[in-house]
Image (cartoon, rainbow, N blue to C red):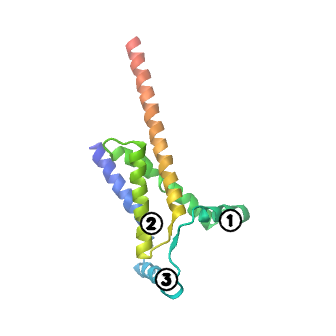
Amino acid sequence: MKQKLTQIVFWVYILFIIDIVAIKFTGSIALIKSRMDTMQWNREKYGIWNYNIVPFKTIRAAIESYITLGFDRSVVNSIANVVLFVPMGLLLPLIMRRPSFVKVMFLSLSIIFTIELFQLITCLGIADIDDVILNFLGCIIGYGMQSTYNKVRETRRGEKKEFLESN
């Protein structure tokens, strides 16, 4: 039952991530269509594609923006790219049969790349290698939190068992 609930939470989280990151649905399908049309028009008219493959380009711009302007949209976006993916690192180990760091990170990267590819193909956003880096960092943080929690829990169980056996 607990495993099934965790799986449901994970899939609701994935749908949330797809909406927030890729679709960005705000209640208006016309707005989504307009965004797609604008990206497509930029491709056709100017040859401008909706991707960035230069690592740290947008991260560097966000850092420079923070230094000069403080918390602006690019800084908030960068932070959100990390924070929104922490739950993935927390939840994936809970729904996998035999999770390991490598398996969880591989699956995390697969999901992240799929979302970025979706944005590129549908013209619903910008496929950005920096998003992949920041999202992956969030997954690593979440996995670290999960691992730390498990180790603390195991240590406490061991201490409790030792206490019960000594009394």
From the viewer's perspective, is residue 15 above or below residue 98?
below
Q: In the rendering, at what x and y percent does residue 16 appear?
A: 40, 62
Judging depth in this view, the residue of 92 and 13 nearest the camera is 92
Single out the mark in the foreground, 3 or 1. Answer: 3
Dot 2 amino acid type: Glu
- Which is closer to the viewer, label 1 or label 2? 2
- The reply to whether residue 25 is visible in this rendering is no
Question: Residue 22 got which mark?
Answer: none
| Quarter of the figure with residue 18 | bottom left
Residue that carries the numbered disc 3 in the rendered image? 43
Q: Which residue is mark 2?
A: 116
Label 1 belongs to which residue?
Answer: 65
Query: Are circles 1 and 2 on residues that touch, CB within 8 Å?
Result: no
Q: Amino acid at mark 3?
A: Arg
Label 2 to label 3, Cα distance in Å? 17 Å
Q: CA distance from mark 1 to mark 2?
A: 24 Å
In the figure, 28 relative to 52: above or below? below
Q: Nearer the viewer, residue 3 or 78?
A: 78
Q: Are marks 2 and 3 in contact (CB under 8 Å)?
A: no
Relative to 9, does residue 154 appear above or below in the rendering?
above
Give residue 86's position: percent from left, percent from top: 48, 51
Give the mark nearest the N terminus, 2 or 3.
Answer: 3
| Amino acid carrying mark 1 in the image | Ser
Q: Tag 2 or tag 1, which sits nearer the N-term? A: 1
Q: Residues within 10 Å of mark 3 (few under 14, many from 20)?
A: some
Q: Relative to 57, does residue 84 appear above or below in the rendering?
A: above
Disc 2, SS: helix
Query: At 48% across and 80% down in the image, what residue appears?
Result: 39
Position of the N terminus by quadrant: top left
Residue 14 in which image quadrant? bottom left
Residue at far right of view: 68
